[in-house]
Amino acid sequence: MRYPKISFVTPMKEQDFRVIRLLESISSQNYPKNKIEVIIIDGGSNPKVLERCKEYGFVKIFNNPKKLAEGAGMGKDQGIWNSTGELIVIAESDIELIGKNWINNMLLPFNKHKDIFASVPRLFIHPKDNPTNRYLSFVGVDPFAVYRSIEGQLELNRRLEK
C-alpha cells in the first residue's frame, strides 16, 4: 500500500481544549506518523491550548492575522498554502476521526480510481454535542452551508410544515 503524506488543515480560535480530541484521534491512526502533519492556523486561541497542541510532534502552528477561517486568504487558505502533504484534509478543531483506520479508509477511493480528487467521509457524532451539532453531523454538512444541502433542505422543510 502506498502511504501519501496527509496534511490536516485546522483553522481555529479555541478558548478551550476541544482540539485535543482531534489531535488524539489523529495520533491514534494506523498510519505512518512521519506521513502526517497538522497545520493549525490560529486566529487568537488561548495560549495554554496552543502549548498543549505543540506537545504533538506532527503539529505546526501558524498565526492567522486575519482571524477568520472562511474566505479567500483566510485560515483554510493559509493552511493549504503552508501544507506539504500530497492530500489535504480540512479538519475543524472540534471534530474527531472515526476509528483508528480513518485515514486508510479515506484513501480507498483515491487508490481505486485515479480520477478521484476529493473524498467526503462520514462525521463522528459526539453524544455530548448539542442537538444542532449532532443533527448537522448526521446530515454531513457545514452549519454555514446547511441551507444548500439537499438533506438539510428536506429536513428544514419538514420541520417548517409541522
Image (cartoon, grey):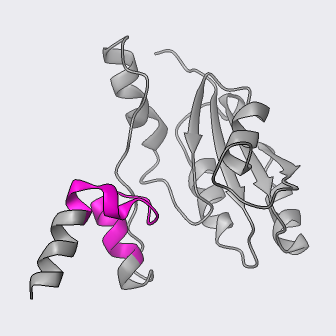
Residue shown at the point (37%, 58%) measured from the top left: 141
Residue shown at the point (48%, 37%) measured from the top left: 103
> Considering depth in this image, is 136 or 77 the residue closer to the camera?
77
Specify whether residue 148 is painted magenta: yes
User: Is residue 143 shown above or below 117?
Assistant: below
- Give the x, y percent position of residue 149: 28, 55
User: Is residue 114 shown above or below 16?
Assistant: above
Left or right: residue 44 versus residue 23 is right
User: Is residue 119 shown above or below 159?
Assistant: above
Farthest residue toward the bottom? 162
User: Is residue 131 shown above or below 65?
Assistant: below
What residue range appears in magenta?
133-152
- Dividing the picture into quadrants, the one containing residue 78 is top right
Left or right: residue 43 versus residue 136 is right
Name the quadrant of the C terminus.
bottom left
Specify whether residue 45 is painted magenta: no
- Dividing the picture into quadrants, the one containing residue 72 is top right
- Give the x, y percent position of residue 99: 42, 52
Kindly report the secondary structure that dominates the magenta region of the rendered protein. helix
Left or right: residue 30 versus residue 58 is left
